Image: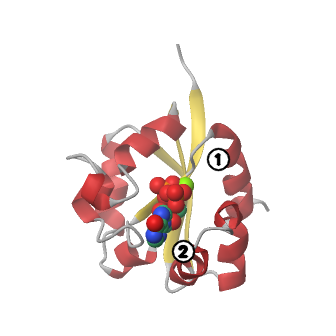
Amino acid sequence: MNNLEQTLSIIKPDAVERNLENEIKEMFKNKGFSILKQKKIQIEKSEAEKFYKVHETKPFYSDLCAYLSSGPIVVMVLEKDNAVIGNRELMGATNPIDAKEGTIRKKYGISIDKNSVHGSDSVENAKIEIDFFFKD
Ligand code: IDP
Ligand code: MG
């Protein structure tokens, strides 16, 4: 059954800095994702704090927000059937050490914090995150 979804993907500063933008986009396209919208931006720490608000009680919250705002990122709206779970599968586990062969984080992730990509974790959060970056 068709279940076309959109999800938010971010190529994080560690990957943009290493010029992996095009290689990572190729991995999405090879898996059948369409990139509907994209922009390269740098955000303020205060914006990262809003974006990652669900993690505000975690010990790594401040470092995480400092990191996401430390350099240019590429934010994208990806679309395909079951895009949310499909993107999570293609990204791989949060810690690159645990990520499976063939995933973005296995291939490019450096560490649990510099893990190269973000992806929405539910259809509901995908809508919120897409609005966060692309609401006109
Ligand atoms: P996810 O990115 O796979 O969805 P989340 O648990 O939502 O993982 O965490 C958001 C981000 O916070 C992760 O991508 C990672 O960069 C960072 N992070 C998660 N857990 C840790 C940790 O234990 N130490 C440092 N950073 C972490
Ligand atoms: Mg998450």
| Quadrant in the picture for residue 32 | top left
Residue occupying image coordinates x 54% and y 75% = 64
For disc 1, the marked residue is 126
Where residue 94 appears, as percent x and y from the top left, is 40, 56
Residue 9 at least partly seen: no
Where residue 118 appears, as percent x and y from the top left, is 49, 59
> Which numbered mark, 2 or 1, is in the foreground of this view?
2
First of labels 2, 1 by sequence position: 2
Q: Residue 8 or 34: which is nearer the viewer? A: 8
Mark 2 vs mark 1, CA separation in Å: 22 Å
- Does residue 79 sit above or below 94 in this rendering? above
Q: Amino acid at mark 2?
A: Phe
Q: Amino acid at mark 1?
A: Ala
Where residue 98 appears, as percent x and y from the top left, is 28, 52
- Does residue 44 sit above or below 35 in this rendering? below
Q: Quadrant of the C terminus?
A: bottom right
Relative to residue 3, is residue 25 drawn left or right? left
| Rendering quadrant holding ligand 2 | bottom right
Where residue 34 appears, as percent x and y from the top left, is 47, 44
Residue occupying image coordinates x 30% and y 43% = 30
Relative to residue 91, is residue 79 drawn left or right? right
Query: Is label 2 in a helix, a strand or a loop?
Result: loop
Relative to residue 68, is residue 98 drawn left or right? left
Disc number for residue 60: 2
User: Does the beta carbon of the residue at mark 2 sit less than 8 Å from ligand 1?
Assistant: yes
Residue occupying image coordinates x 56% and y 84% = 66
